[in-house]
Amino acid sequence: VQLAESGGGLVQPGEFLRLSCAASGSIVGIYDMGWYRQAPGKQREEVARITRGGRINYADSVQGRFTISRDNAKNTVYLQMMNLKPEDTAVYYCNMDGLERGLKAFDSWGQGTQVTVSS
C-alpha cells in the first residue's frame, strides 16, 4: 500500500495549510490514520491520529489549532493546520495501518511533505 502526501509549503506565522494523504493499492480496510512530523535535529513525533471509528488524539502542542479528518471512501486523511507557528516547521509524514488483499496487514508511511513557517 502506497501513501502520497500533498499540501505542504512555505507560509507566514498565523496562516494555514491543509495536508492530504491518499492511500493506493489492494486495500481491504484501513484502521488508524495519523500524521507525524520531524523537525531538524529532533525525533519524529505524532501530531494527530484518527481511528476508523472516529476517535481522535492530538499532540498537546497542536490541540485547538490542527484538525484531522478522514474520508474512508477515498482512503484519504487530511490535516487542517490553522494559526501556524515557526515551531510547526517540520517534514510531515502520514501513516496508515490496515489490511490489504489476502488479509495481509500493512503499516505504511508517506514520503513526507515539508511545512515551513517563517516570516
Image (cartoon, grey):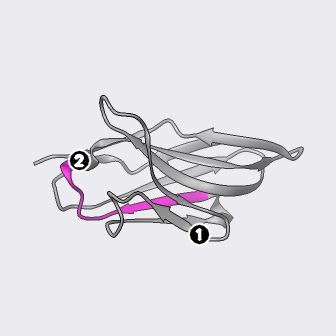
Q: Quadrant of residue 114?
A: top left
At which x and y percent is residue 38? 38, 38
Query: How busy is the neighbourhood of tag 1: few (under 14 within 10 Å), some, or many (20 plus)?
Result: few
Q: Which of 7 and 14 is in front in this view?
A: 14
Q: Which amino acid type is shown beneath numbered disc 1?
A: Arg
Tell me if residue 85 is in the magenta stretch.
yes
**Identity of the residue drawn at 32% across and 41% down:** 90
Query: Does residue 52 sit above or below 87 in this rendering?
Result: below
Disc 2, SS: helix
Residue contact at pointers 2 and 1, CB within 8 angstroms? no
Could you tell me how far apart the alpha carbons at marks 2 and 1 are, in whole angstroms?
26 Å
Which residue position holds label 2? 87
Residue 107 seen in the current view: yes
Please tell me which residue is depicted at 32% across the width and 37% down the height of the picture.
39
- Judge left or right: residue 101 versus residue 77: right
Q: Mark 1 points at which residue?
A: 55
Magenta stretch: includes residue 115: no
Q: Is mark 1 on a helix, strand or loop?
A: loop
Measured as percent of width and height from the top left, residue 70 is found at 57, 65
User: On the rendered structure, is 85 left or right of 112?
Assistant: left
- Residue at image location 58% in from the left, 58% down from the top: 76
Looking at the image, can residue 1 be seen? no
| Closest to the observer, 65 or 26 | 65
- Magenta span: 76-86
Q: Which labelled disc corresponds to residue 28?
A: none
- Kindly give the residue lying farthest to the right in the view shown: 102
Q: Residue at x 89, y 44 (%)?
A: 102
Q: Is residue 26 left or right of residue 46?
A: right
Q: Which amino acid does label 2 sit on?
A: Glu
